[in-house]
Amino acid sequence: MTQNSISDYIHELFPQFEPVLKEKLIAHVTMKSFKATELLMQTGQYFRSTVLIVKGRVKLYREGTDGNEFFMYYLQPGDACALSMICAAKQESSKIMGKAIEDSTILMVPIALMDELMKRYPSWYYFVMETYRSRFEELLLVIDSIAFNGLDERLGFYLKKQGEHLGTKQLNLTHQEIATDLNSSREVISRLLKKMEQRGEIQLYRNYIALLN
Amino acid sequence: MTQNSISDYIHELFPQFEPVLKEKLIAHVTMKSFKATELLMQTGQYFRSTVLIVKGRVKLYREGTDGNEFFMYYLQPGDACALSMICAAKQESSKIMGKAIEDSTILMVPIALMDELMKRYPSWYYFVMETYRSRFEELLLVIDSIAFNGLDERLGFYLKKQGEHLGTKQLNLTHQEIATDLNSSREVISRLLKKMEQRGEIQLYRNYIALLN
DNA sequence: GACATCAGGTGACTTTTGTCACCGGCCATC
DNA sequence: GATGGCCGGTGACAAAAGTCACCTGATGTC
């Protein structure tokens, strides 16, 4: 991807914002880049800004007390991190881990600006509300899948979500990575994947999985 | 509890609101009462208002495809329903069930008023943000407990939450009710409770459980 | 008092999931 | 081309959770 400026990103990814709001953001946000695998935020960290993703892909997951990971959802360009909004607004520490899975770039909107943006710019207000709504729903889906479904269904749900999100039927995932995301173990995932393959839902290869149908 | 007016409730439960905001709310909200066990909201329902709880206790739970329930959290007087805010703002249907577990009263703030309140009254804005933040965190705790813990730990977590919320060490719960809330089965819960009793953490009686320590 | 209903207990069994040990193939690198 | 690390497969077993059948005792009702 080409080297974009703050202004380019804002015009490309947030066309719905009023021109005055765009100017305001361009004047006040700061840009920060992360290499793939770098952590953007970790449990206990305090935010001083609301985070907008403008390039790359960020994986949000919950960390258990014994170091387990539990995948929740991805953020992509045009998304805001709901947690950073909430925590920044309240000066609270985050309870979630964020890792760049591609080289990624974010814009940081200073907290001090938030109140004014919310009051003065309807398009910002709606953007924030929509961010809360969609993340809340995403969390409810996650709860559904662990509360009501067996690991086999969760695995299906997970693969489908990966496919949709990455926009491809070729998933570059190892069994170990999947097991980690679902807080399970490799052997179990391998067996379940094998069953899915026998049912003709997927095809297994080394280092990647092909989604059928 | 005595028969309160809208004005009484607002002054008692929301003292942090600016006087002008209180007047505005008193002039525009409508009050509605529910009997214990009545449903306040159900999956698929559309909201035309943001809901504030002013009396009683409302249990929010997720409903699975096959009619299972899964308890998430309680709302009590002074709380707002985050889901109703989000859904009302976006005209989306709710994905959650709300049931009055005591005779309860709510105030309904028309959607049409929301934008204005958010823009004009900082104390409303902060109240809304705090509502989002605390519900989000509550959901994260729920996810933690199902993602990382066994049923035994979840049961302990559940009993503790009930005790804290209801402000008592005598929980009037049947094993079947607990099993339903945790999406498990009565026999399993009975066995785990027995183990907790043997470890001296609780005492079991007919129709109620005493929390020790 | 006879009866039905409900809360809870228990043993036997199954299914699901996790764990351990070990194997084989692929691949990068020296 | 030998080595070692990663990826995946597999069998055997253990632990956790769910299911089934049946029992006991308390409670309420007619």
Image (cartoon, coloured by chain):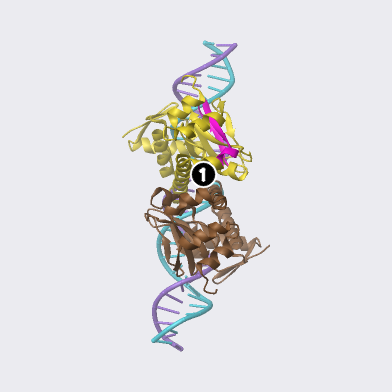
Chain colours: A brown, B yellow, C cyan, D purple
Residue at image coords 66%, 64%: A212
B23 or B198, nearer to the observer: B23
Indicate the quadrant where residue B27 lies. top right
Q: Mark 1 — on which chain does it sit? A: B
Identify which residue, C25 or A185, lies in the foreground. A185
Q: How many marks?
A: 1
Q: Is residue B118 left or right of residue C30?
A: right
Instruction: Tell me if mark 1 has few (under 14), some (14-19) or many (20+) residues whose alpha carbon lies within 10 angstroms of its own.
Output: some
Location of residue A123 in the rendering, given as x and y in whole percent from the top left corner: 57, 52
| Residue situated in front as seen by the camera: B83 or A80 | A80
Q: Is residue B39 above or below residue A61?
A: above
Foreground: B75 or B108?
B108
Q: Is residue B210 left or right of residue A61?
A: left
The x, y position of residue B60, in whole percent, is 52, 37
Residue B174 image point, x, y percent: 47, 30
A195 left or right, relative to A50: right
Q: Is residue D16 left or right of residue B45?
A: left
- Whether residue B153 appears in this view of the structure is yes
Q: Which residues make up the magenta segment?
A: B95-114
Task: Please state the horizontal and vertical placement of residue A194, each as a whole percent of the image.
Answer: 58, 63
The answer to which quarter of the image holds residue B33 is: top right
Seen as rendered, the residue at the extreme front is A20
Q: Is residue A56 in sight in this rendering?
A: no
Does the magenta segment cover residue B34? no
Q: Is residue A51 above or below residue B56?
A: below
Q: Dividing the image into 4 quarters, which one contains the C terminus of chain B?
A: top left
Identify which amino acid the numbered label 1 is placed on.
Lys
Q: Secondary structure at mark 1?
A: helix
- Which residue position holds label 1? B119
Residue occupying the far right of the picture? A213
